[in-house]
């Protein structure tokens, strides 16, 4: 089986699992919403202030929500040793990783698709003119989060205190991604929006560097 | 076993000479005067940190490729030394920042990068503490170490693009840059002294890790023998 096809099968399995339980997505969305609401107490949410702090707030909410949501990706394979079964299949380890990355990309993008409009309403920011560009920024930023996050989810799944460990490993690594994502989002939230291409290229570069590293290291990551 | 006394004495002498050179031989700096002399050890800490973390990166890759335990010992030892050097660089930087810039800390590219690196490598050490099984601990922490090292240039580039207030590079930084030759010589002494000191402690730390490993193996052998003295496994170990 080719890597792409195997990854598609793993992706389908992850989606089916989530579609049946629907616990992960609901909790993630509500958690991010809680952060967005709590932030309204941290500063005065007028239109001007929201433009200044909004992009950072939004990405911090995604980062925190993502770092919690990515944990079960490998942790839930532990209880019944299902990862061993997956590994026994005649597919490359990278296919397993890629399938899980794509599933997490879909979950997190779905959560973002619900949160961004709510955020725009609550913080009074008009996004209608920049929807296409905002989606591009969100996808590139989220991709970087799920690439590193899925790898670290596999790393943390073997450790004690893994729920605490994953954010600890993930959030500092994502510092450059946070800066780039916040800056490109801020360029879209400003009075006269124009997408900052340098930051967008930076986001793409981040994704490429870590996707390549994950591909090269996937054999070691998922070995028994 | 070879005596480590001569090399230790030599490194100690180099450190003392570096301190003397930084305080008395190096010329006075025009605007910052005496306080600038911390620079020689500040830069020395960073040189030691980069050396240690580069060794760690190489050791991490070498462990994944060869699976020889010594690379894992080298990996954890050099990360610990890297964190220690980073701490010393951050502290000397903060002490220097207050009189030179008027503030203790600023979120400039190099400070932020080093702070993030410090956090990342402390996470590496925490990660190691939380995985029991030695093989798995070595592999997973090596993967994390490689990711952390790859992240460093990205952290730096992103902060550089974003905001920076450090002086533009003094060394190799264009035609107006450059140090007074006397300062350059003192700098060379302190940077090599700090790096050699780091390498000396690294060698000791590596030896400690090796001894721990040997102790674990002996303990395991003793347990097997105590549990079943006549078993095949016990005979094999003895």
Image (cartoon, coloured by chain):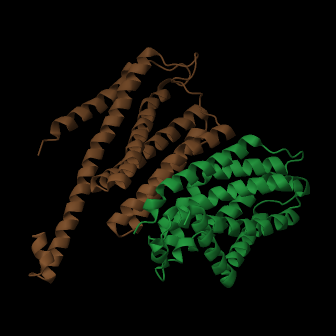
Residue B173 in which image quadrant: top right
Which chain wears green? Answer: A
- Side (left or right) of A209 relative to A220: right
Count the marks.
Answer: 0
Q: Is residue A126 visible?
A: no
- Compared with residue B170, is residue B136 higher up or lower down, i.e. above or below? below
Q: Position of residue A39 (x, y in %)?
A: 75, 64
Comparing B200 with B36, the one in front is B200
Query: Residue extending furthest front?
Result: A1
Residue plotted at (58% across, 41% down): B156
Comparing B45 with B100, the one in front is B45
Q: Is residue A83 visible?
A: yes
Residue B47 in which image quadrant: top left
Residue plotted at (54% across, 48% down): B151
Q: Position of residue B89 (x, y in %)?
A: 46, 40
Quarter of the image with the C terminus of chain B is bottom left
Residue plotted at (41% across, 56% down): B142
Residue plotted at (38% across, 65% down): B136
- Side (left or right) of B138 relative to B218: right
Which chain wears brown? Answer: B
Comparing B89 with A125, the one in front is A125
- Compared with residue A23, is residue A205 higher up or lower down, i.e. above or below? above
Q: Position of residue B22 (x, y in %)?
A: 39, 26
- Compared with residue A127, is residue B39 higher up or lower down, i.e. above or below? above
Q: Position of residue B147 (x, y in %)?
A: 50, 52
Residue A128 in which image quadrant: bottom right
């Amino acid at each position: 089986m080719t890597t792409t096809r195997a990854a598609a099968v793993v992706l389908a399995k992850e989606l089916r699992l989530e579609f049946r339980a629907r616990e992960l997505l609901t909790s993630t969305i509500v958690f991010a919403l809680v952060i967005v609401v709590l932030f309204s107490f941290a500063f005065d949410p007028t239109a001007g202030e929201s433009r200044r702090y909004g992009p950072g707030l939004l990405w911090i909410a995604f980062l925190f929500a993502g770092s919690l949501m990515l944990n079960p990706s490998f942790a839930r394979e532990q209880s019944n040793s299902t990862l061993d079964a997956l590994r026994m299949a005649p597919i490359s380890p990278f296919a397993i990783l890629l399938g899980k990355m794509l599933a997490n990309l879909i979950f997190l993008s779905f959560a973002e698709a619900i949160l961004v409009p709510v955020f725009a309403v609550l913080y009074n920011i008009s996004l209608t003119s920049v929807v296409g560009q905002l989606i591009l920024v969100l996808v590139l930023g989220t991709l970087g989060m799920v690439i590193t996050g899925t790898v670290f989810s596999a790393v943390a799944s073997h450790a004690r205190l893994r729920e605490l460990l994953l954010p600890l490993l993930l959030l500092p690594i994502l510092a450059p991604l946070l800066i780039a994502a916040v800056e490109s989002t801020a360029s879209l939230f400003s009075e006269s929006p124009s997408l900052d291409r340098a930051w967008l290229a930076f986001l793409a570069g981040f994704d490429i560097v870590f996707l390549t590293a994950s591909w090269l290291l996937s054999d070691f990551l998922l070995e028994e | 076993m070879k005596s480590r006394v001569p090399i230790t004495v030599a490194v100690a002498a180099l450190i003392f000479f570096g301190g003397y050179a930084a305080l008395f031989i190096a010329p006075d700096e025009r605007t910052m005067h005496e306080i600038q002399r911390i620079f020689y050890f500040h830069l020395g800490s960073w040189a030691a940190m980069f050396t240690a973390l580069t060794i760690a990166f190489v050791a991490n890759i070498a462990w994944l490729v060869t699976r020889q335990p010594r690379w894992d010992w080298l990996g954890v030892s050099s990360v610990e030394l890297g964190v220690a050097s980073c701490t010393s660089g951050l502290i000397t930087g903060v002490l220097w920042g207050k009189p030179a810039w008027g503030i203790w800390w600023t979120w400039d590219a190099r400070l932020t990068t080093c702070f993030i690196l410090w956090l990342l490598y402390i996470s590496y050490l925490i990660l190691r503490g939380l995985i029991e099984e030695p093989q798995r601990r070595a592999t997973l922490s090596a993967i994390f170490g490689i990711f952390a090292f790859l992240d460093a240039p990205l952290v730096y580039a992103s902060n550089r693009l974003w905001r920076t207030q450090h002086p533009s590079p003094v060394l190799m930084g264009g035609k107006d840059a450059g140090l007074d030759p006397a300062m350059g010589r003192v700098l060379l002494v302190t940077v090599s002294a700090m790096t050699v000191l780091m390498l000396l402690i690294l060698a000791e730390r590596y030896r400690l890790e090796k001894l721990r490993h040997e102790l674990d193996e002996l303990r395991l052998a003793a347990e097997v023998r105590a549990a079943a003295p006549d078993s095949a496994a016990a005979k094999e170990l003895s």
